[in-house]
Image (spheres, coloured by chain):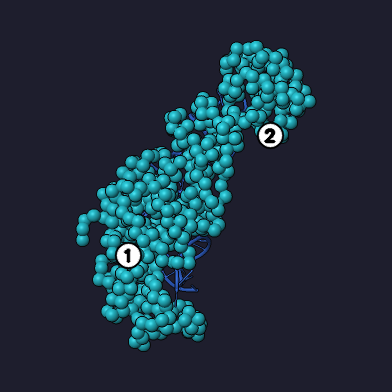
Chain colours: A cyan, B blue
Amino acid sequence: MSGTPRYRFAPSPTGYFHVGGARTALYNWILALQSDGVFVLRIEDTDESRNQPQWTQGIIDALAWIGINGSDPHFEGPYFQSAYAAAHTAAAQKLFESGHAYYCDLTSEQIQERAKAAGKPGYDGYSRDRGLSAGPGRVLRFKVPTGVTVVHDEVRGEVSFDNSTIEDFVLLRGNGSPVFIHANVVDDIAMGITNVVRAEEHLPNTPKQQMLWQALGKTPPVWAHVPVLVNEQRKKLSKRRDKVALEQYRAEGVVADAMVNYLMTLGWAPTGDTEIVDFAQIVADFRLASVNHSSAFFDVKKLGAFNGEYLRKMSTDEFIAACEPWLSGTAPSVPGVEVTPTMTPWPTERFDRAVFARVAPLVQTRVSLLSEVPAMVDFFFLADPAIDTAAFDKAFSAEWARPALRSMREQLGSVEWSVEAVKSAVEAVGASFDVKLGKLQAPLRVATTGRSVGPPLFESLEVLGRDETLRRIDAALTRAG
RNA sequence: GCUCCCAUCGUCUAGCGGCCUAGGACACAGCCCUCUCAAGGCUGCGGCACGGGUUCAAAUCCCGUUGGGAGUGCCA
């Protein structure tokens, strides 16, 4: 045995990258980093009916996004399970020849019938001693020995299984192809895997895999089964039902650091009173033994809160750079998955970087997702603001609204164009109408921005400019009648 | 059904026999700040599933109950 710990992450390319998979990958990655070990990426592409090659690139991109980069010396792979077919059959042959496995020609229907007749579910070992040789349609089954299999699990301790509750499971299908349990073990052996860290759903098949390791004459790896991520119904997150695509969160403007940090607080907590910690701290603190035993709810709201914190922590320049894809219409898109529009609300040629740079600090404290940014600054780049009619009508429902706005228009025509001067002018109008600034700003805001909420108004007007402000007030006055 | 896992505020967690009248975060409510909305600050609400043990002492250890979950495929 070499002294270098070898971890692995073995996803199958059957769809978008699951947030639960991301967390499992992160665990393995962090463990590899802190032990100066290796993180092996193996693509388990043996289910021909569900695999799609494009998903493989998706996995690699997703991993890179959360910091698990193929160019890092701790990273090894990707390996493809399909390339190890010869090893799978060789190992199966070895198990057959050593008496650890046998062929069976029963169809699944026949097995079901037998089980029904016997009143016991599962395969009953019918072909154990029939001495069948390999042949088309015949599956190879593992001959589960009597006794007890004890799994040593880094997060759960010792878990023991009575072998009598484990049926003689299939290794090779009728067409000769290996089944997950078998291929997985053979590959782990071939790749010298020493530590298997995976989701709890794999715990029930761990005794089977451990028996395989032993039958193949190898020392089983150190196992660790981490709790699954669940939805609000406390059911395992599923691709069908739940919003689980890492790509989708990325497209909505969750930043990688926030995603990584949030994922790591599920089932585990950094030491100290704060959950927002940088990756180096996580790598330093993380311990498998302190991972929780119970499932964790993937709370999108809290993810958003984390993301907001990360956004606010950025310098203005960093924030501007992070926003760029959403402002230029080049945000990552996720075909087939419902996601916020990647089109900007304005014609791209109207976008003005300098203008955004001036207002960026104002929007930075007001968004929790990068995809929310365009809607917050659209009025700067649209020829005319998109009027929210409900907000408009409400703002102009007051008696004083029209005359006050007319009066503001007059003042703004000649006042010095600065935040303070504009604000004072508007306040003066408010005084003459006996309306507080909080209320008074509403018609002005809707007229110039189209909405009742948004970035600070006077700062916005300063950036918008006198001419455009006046033009929009006139348009609103016309509209209000 | 069978096998296995799990059980601290609504949620994520700290706690690993005395420091706990159980701490933090998200969410929620109120207040402050304030040109809207946020952000920020302060305060509040709210939990050891239940029942037995063990112990001078239990959220922490043991057993049971109840309740969740996962697996039970010639899917991975």
| Quadrant, the N terminus of chain A | bottom left
Find the residue positioned furthest to the right. Answer: A481
Write the residue at 36% across / 82% down: A134
Q: Which residue is mark 2?
A: A388
Write the residue at 33% across / 45% down: A283
Q: Amino acid at mark 1?
A: Asp
Cα distance in 3D space between marks 1 and 2: 59 Å
| Chain of the residue under the numbered disc 1 shown in the image | A
| Quadrant, the C terminus of chain A | top right
Q: Position of residue A53 (x, y in %)?
A: 44, 59
- Report helix, strand or loop for mark 1: helix
Q: Amino acid at mark 2?
A: Asp
Label 2 Cα neighbours within 10 Å, binned few <14 / some 14-19 / many ≥20 = some
Which image quadrant is residue A105 in? bottom left
Write the residue at 54% across / 58% down: A240
Q: Position of residue A122 (x, y in %)?
A: 45, 77
Which image quadrant is residue A171 in? bottom left
A51 relative to A352, above or below = below
Write the residue at 48% across / 83% down: A110
Left or right of residue A280, residue A361 in this image: right
Q: Position of residue A374 (x, y in %)?
A: 56, 35
Seen from the viewer's position, the closer of residues A367 and A284 is A367
Label 1 Cα neighbours within 10 Å, binned few <14 / some 14-19 / many ≥20 = many
Say yes or no: labels 1 and 2 on the same chain: yes
Q: Position of residue A284 (x, y in %)?
A: 31, 44
Which image quadrant is residue A445 in? top right
Q: Which residue is mark 1?
A: A187
Find the residue positioned furthest to the front. Answer: A349
